[in-house]
Image: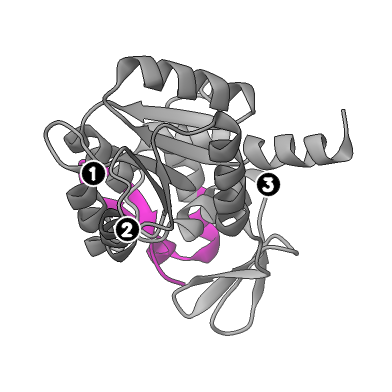
Amino acid sequence: MSVQGTTRFRQADRCRLLLIEDDHELVELLSGALRDEGYTVDVALDGHRGLHLGLTRPYDVVIIDRRLPALDGLDLLVRLRSRAVRTRALMLTALGTVHDRIDGLDAGADDYLVKPFELDELSARLRALCRRALELTDALPIGSGYLDIVQREAVLPTGEHVPLSAREFALLRVLATHADTVHTRAVLRRTVFGDASAASIVDTYVYYLRAKLGRSVVHTVQGLGYRLGTL
């Protein structure tokens, strides 16, 4: 495997995609091809399901068809942006006039690809969006403190550095990367710890983080899950 191919695979392996498309044949083709490239892919077959997943689960890129049952793709994207969801978005549609493209970009899309398209072009566009979404920074803000990505520790507003275990760091990083998202326990368990982990593992590590950093670092959303709090 070439160095370029290895780089592409490693990038895809870190990138979580949400595909919102109602064409079952196209969904099967795209989801299979993207998973083969190493992406983690969730699928929604209508706009309402896509909106629910986009609001409640962390993704790096969302691929949205313009014409969807239940909720139009353009309206879906507007609603995501109105709820402060900043996930990179690629509009995938047969509507390809200049006016259509402008509408999509103005609604909050980061890119726009017209059907029919070549799979290689879609892959290239997704790699570009994933690079932007996964670009590492030295720190992620948590209220008046921050998470130090390089040292893998939390820095309190007082300047105190608090070391974190690998799993504590991974959990807090997901919460801090998608700070406006409410994460269900099931999604956090799958994303951070793997499906084979005990059902209670998320609650356990939230407890550990609160013990080290204070109860306000992770906020409980009753009946839904957890989101980032403050230090």
Q: Earlier in the sequence, mark 1 or mark 2?
A: 1
CA–CA distance in space, label 3 to label 1: 38 Å
- In the current view of this chain or complex, which residue is farthest to the left? 70
> Can you tell which of label 3 and label 1 is closer to the viewer?
1
- Dot 1 falls on a residue whose secondary structure is helix
- The image position of residue 111, as x and y in percent, is 44, 54
Asked if the residues shown at circle 1 and circle 2 are in contact, with their CB atoms under 8 angstroms apart, the answer is no
From the image, tell me which residue sits under label 1: 73
Q: Is residue 109 left or right of residue 147?
A: left
Q: Which residues are magenta?
A: 208-231
From the image, tell me which residue sits under label 3: 166
Q: At 49% across and 60% down in the image, what residue appears?
A: 176
- In the current view of this chain or complex, which residue is farthest to the bottom? 158
Residue 98 numbered tag: 2
Q: Is residue 229 above or below residue 96?
A: below
> What is the quadrant of residue 196 in the picture?
top right
Q: At 36% across and 45% down in the image, what residue appears?
A: 183
- The image position of residue 35, as x and y in percent, is 56, 24
CA–CA distance in space, label 3 to label 2: 48 Å
CA–CA distance in space, label 1 to label 2: 17 Å
Q: Is residue 191 above or below residue 164?
A: above
> Callout 1 environment at 10 Å: few (<14), some (14 to 19), or many (20+)?
many
- The image position of residue 90, as x and y in percent, is 42, 48
Residue 95 magenta-highlighted: no
